[in-house]
Structure formats: C-alpha cells, structure tokens
Amino acid sequence: MATPTAVLEPPTEAGAKGLKSGALGLVSTTVIGVASTAPGYSLAASLGLVTAAVGLHAPGIMLLAFAPMLFIAAAYFYLNRADPDCGTTFTWVTRAMGPNTGWLAGWGILMTDLVVMPSLSQIAGRYTFLLFGADGVANGVLWVTVVGVIWIVVMTAICYVGIELSARTQVALLGAEIVILATFAVIALIKVYADNPASSVHPALSWLNPVSGSSGALAAGVLTAVFIYWGWDTAVTVNEETDDSSRTPGIAALLSTLILVGIYVIVSVAAQAFHGSDFLTKNSGDVLGALGTDVFGSPFDKLLIIAVLTSASASTQTTILPAARSALSMAVHRAAPRKFADINPRFLTPGFATAAFGVVSIVWYVVLTLISKNVLGDSILALGFGICFYYALTGYACVLYYRRHLFSSARNLLLIGIAPLLGALGLTWAFFKSVFVYSNAANSSSGTTAYFKFISFDFKIWHFHFFADGLGPPLVIGVGLLLIGIPLMLLWRLGRPEFFEHKRGAAETIDGLAPPLTPGVGPVA
Amino acid sequence: MAGDIILGYDGSAGSAAALRAAVQVAHAFGAPLVVAFGYEVMPLGGEVADYARQVRQIGEEKVAEGAALAAALDPSVAVEAVAVPERPSDALLTLAEQRGARCIVVGGMGDRPLVGAILGSVPHRLLYRSTVPVLVVPATDD
C-alpha cells in the first residue's frame, strides 16, 4: 500500500470523532494487523484444506489469494476515509448501492463472523487437549465441543468486560507466534534435507505456481485461502488513530503484508515438504499439532500448540468485537433492533450485541457439531463464501461511491477504481465457481454428506458443466446463511421501513467525511 | 486557572461519594471543580467511529449529571463538565497536567480488590503515576 500523499490526505480532525488521536505507533499498528489475521490459527485451520484442493500447489494459492485481499484493502482504506463507522461494509454499501444491498452486506458480515466461531472453538478445544497430551480426547467430539463452548463463553466475557491486553503484551505474544512458526519451518526444512522423513518431498519452484489443473480446484483453493488473510485489512483501517496518520498505516500495511505472506508461504512449503501434501489433507483437523511432534519433538512441540492457541484467542477477539460493532452500527442506523445499540454503562462495550453474539455462536457451534461430520472443514469453506460476498461488495461499493472521482488522476483510477474492481471481480469469480464445485457434495470435506437431495442435475452448456446430486454442507451453510438474510430483510423492512428510505449517493470529495447515514444520529465528524 | 480540583465521575456509588468530597474540597480552596469522564474504545477489530460516538454520549450524560449534582450541593463552587477520549486514568492525569490541578478526586473500588486487579483500577494507577495529590474516597452506604 502506497503512502498517501497530499492529494489523498485523510481528514485531520480524528479527535473530533470522539477518538483519541496519536494513539498507535508503527509497531502497534502492524501488530494489530497481523494479530487480527492470526497466522498460527489460520494455518492450523486451513492448510490441510488447501492441500486437499490443490495438492502441492498450496504455497502458490497462499500467494495468489493475497492479490484480491490487497485490492480490497485499497477499497477499505478509502471508504474508511469517507465513513469510519464500525458498520464498515454495511454503511459503505448502503451509501453506494442503497439500503437493500447495504442491509444484506451487514447480514453477510454477521453471518461470516458467526460461521468462523465453530472453527475457532474447534481448534481451541482440540489444541487445548493436545497441549496436555490428551491426544485421544482431542479426537473425540464431546469433550472438544465442551471446551470449545467454554472458550466462546470466556472470550465473549472478555469482550463484554472490555479487557484489552496492553500493546506490549500483544507484541510479545505475536512475536512469539511468528518466531515459533518460523522456527518450525526452518527445522522442518533442515530435517527434510538431512533426515528424509517419511514421504517427504524436496521443495520445488513449481509449488509457487497456483494453477494445478482445473479451475474448480483453483477456486476452491482461493475460497479457502482468502480466509487466511481475513482481518488483514484492519491494519489499513486503523489509520485514524495512528501516531502519524499520513505514513504509519502505509508502512504498517506493507510490513504486515510481508510478515503474513512470508510466514504463509514458508510454513506451507515446509509443512508439505516434511510429510507430503497427503499427510496435511489427512490431518486437516490439526495439521500443526500432527506435524509439531515430528518436527520439534517433545516437549518443544507444545510451543507450536501454544502459538496456535494464543493466535486463536486473538482471532476470536477480533471476530466478536467487529461482529458486535456491526450489529451496533446497524441498530444505530435503524437497520436492526434498537437493543443492539445498547452500551453497557459500566464497561462501555456494546454489551447486548456482544452477549447475543456469544449465545448465538454457542447454539450454532453445538448444532453444527451435531449435524456435520467435519465442523472445521465445512466452516472454513462456508466462511470463504461469506468473505467473498462482503469483500466483493466492498470493492464494488468503493468504485460506485467514488465514481465521480475515478478519472481525476491516474492514482485515483488505480487505487479507487481498478484495484477494488479487480479484487471484487476475482472474489466474485471464486464465489460462483465454488458454488459449482460444492454443489457436488463429493467435493466437500465431509465427503458424502449431502443436503437437499432432490436438487439433482447433470448437464453441460458450452463448456460449463452443471452438476449436482444434493448440495454439499459448505454450500448449504455458506450460501444458505446469506440467503436467509433476504426474507429477514423483507420482514424488517415491513416492520421498520425507516432505514430503507435511504437514497444511494456518490462521494462529494475524496477526503471529506460523508454526512450521517441516518438523520438525527449526529454527524460523523 | 491553576488549582482546579479534578473529579473522576462515572455515576457509580464510589464516584458519587467522591463527588461529595470533591465539592467540599473545591469549596474549601475556593477552586473550580472539573467533573471528568475518560473513555476509550478498543481499536482492535477495525472501525469504531459510531461506537465511540455512542460511548461519548454516555460520558457526556454522566458528566452533565455529575456537574448538576455538584452545583446543587454547593452553588458557590464553579463547575465544569468534560468527557475525554482517553483511558480513564490517562484522562484524569492529562487534565490535571493541563489545568495545573491542586488534586485529583476519585471513588475507591469498594471491597472487591480482585475485580480491581483483573480489570485494572483507576485509583491504583493514579497513585503510582500522578504528580499531584490523589484523594481516594470510599463508597458509603447512604
């Protein structure tokens, strides 16, 4: 991300928004970006799923999936400038594309945050048992679910009370996580060349090529891999509160990018070199746990498990906080029940929204555990649909909102036009391509489980092969939850039409703050 | 306008007791009273503008309420109300420095030291970091 120049200078009166200005330094901003992305947990949760889709081309997918995220981050950066509300995509899409699409975007954020919770809890539960050497229990459903539920309760309570680790603690935790992951990669690679562990493969340059064959595999790989960069945009959007808001966010974004892409590529190369990609696919539920023992040996393998757990806790926090705030923002703008805007007077957090999200997460996690054979796999893939949906909308919203400013400079055209549009198109492609892939239940990680068996067809138009024999769980969860939003929106619209009277608009200037979305709520600045 | 009395007020029982003490101190010194509320929203997890606005609203209501209470207790004391977008302890310290304050008055944490230790207690932080005297007032039953 380039450093903003005078042409695209952010508004200076950050303090006027009720925010403390000059709060975050370069290190903290970078840390927030990387910690929100949670590399340890992301790798633990998704590496096996990526290799399942593309085999040894996983490192290439890790590289490729970053491109749309980078492009969408540009959209985040500039839309945040117009409207730094915590509704993010919900507010921006409402402005650019009207209240109906905006409402659905908000719903998309909430559902995506909800879908990631079972995967986080599952990883937390599993790795907690691995940490204490109870590997047998770690593979059982009941106790992992129990610990997973406790995990959600504790993390929701932390967000409710508003406990925040000091910046120094966060830097230390993240630093440890990165060092452990890097050490893991280095030791694994050394052992690959020195000891030739079972079914190890020497790294090859072709691994960095994301294209492994079919475009369906590519889309499935991207759908999984967008998840590992999810949250990275936070580094770009905390610009209002940084020490030197014209330089810090740019450098922080660049640094966190290098750290993330570097870690993902190196760890995925090392992991698949060590035991081959089939091992990762087979152990997709606890890749790092399974590899850690062979790479580090006891007791140092516990370090890797601790890194995954701290990473998962950061990720849980950066899921609950934005989910509650999105609900708060929707409530403030009359797009959701008023209750969700309640601020707990003692802790000053969106108390009701936070608690509600925790409760719904637990219900969803337990239900999913009961109906799915592979909670983790189904969740991560379903999550990909949600992320693609609302990130793509963000990209389109940026282009539409700034449509009058696109052609005023080459820089504008690139950063608020071409980049967001390319990102959005890429994610749209991955979304629809994956719909086709996962309409075949055999392609999902649960294997043969299929819902809606009456949906069954097999035909070809031109070279598009339409095939379904029942629908796979990732598709049902990912797209199903998004679709439920449509009747809900219509219901809310019947009962409380206020929010839906908004007209879509275009930005008046690229630097100016947008007028308040809902009259009577008070200006943004 | 040096010599202000800075009162940390959040509407809790402890801060209400602190308010009564602060009014007396302000009266005794003939000093102006600043009723302050510090708030901070977590930047972790992205944008916070409308959330911060909601919190600010709460803060402004609290200090207005505190200022009204103080004025009712002793009309001779000059009262000012401010909501500061900083962590509560930082907000009070900043204000004290800006105003060249005579002292800071806050409510005690009551009889729950463990809660204070976990959540971080404002009086505790102030006692270590303040360069002006700090008056910690225990909550009373009335």
Image (cartoon, coloured by chain):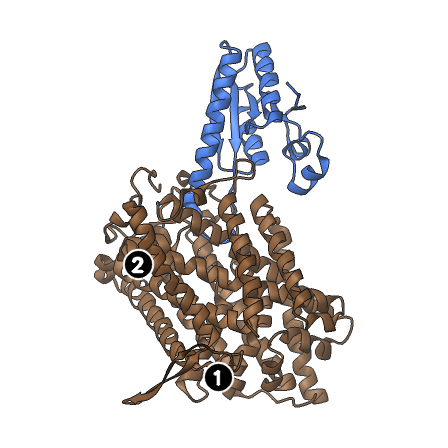
Residue B107, relative to residue A473: is it above or below? above
Cα distance between the residues tagged 1 and 2: 33 Å
Residue A512: image location, x then y, percent: 30, 47
Residue sitting farthest toward the front: A454
Instruction: Report the side of A70 relative to A56 (left or right).
Output: left
Query: Closer to the N terminus: mark 1 or mark 2?
Result: 2
Nearer to us in this view, B74 or A183:
B74
How busy is the neighbourhood of tag 2: few (under 14 within 10 Å), some, or many (20 plus)? Answer: some
Q: Quadrant of residue B13?
A: top right
Q: Which chain is brown?
A: A
Residue sitting farthest toward the right: A299
Colour chosen for chain B: blue
Q: Quadrant of residue A134?
A: bottom right
Q: For the residue labelled by badge 1, is the local secondary structure a helix, a strand or a loop?
A: helix
Q: Can residue B81 be spotted in the picture?
A: no
Residue depicted at x 51% and y 18%: B69
Q: Which residue is mark 1?
A: A442
Residue B89, relative to residue A112: is it above or below? above
| Label number found at residue B2 | none
Chain to which the residue tagged by mark 2 belongs: A
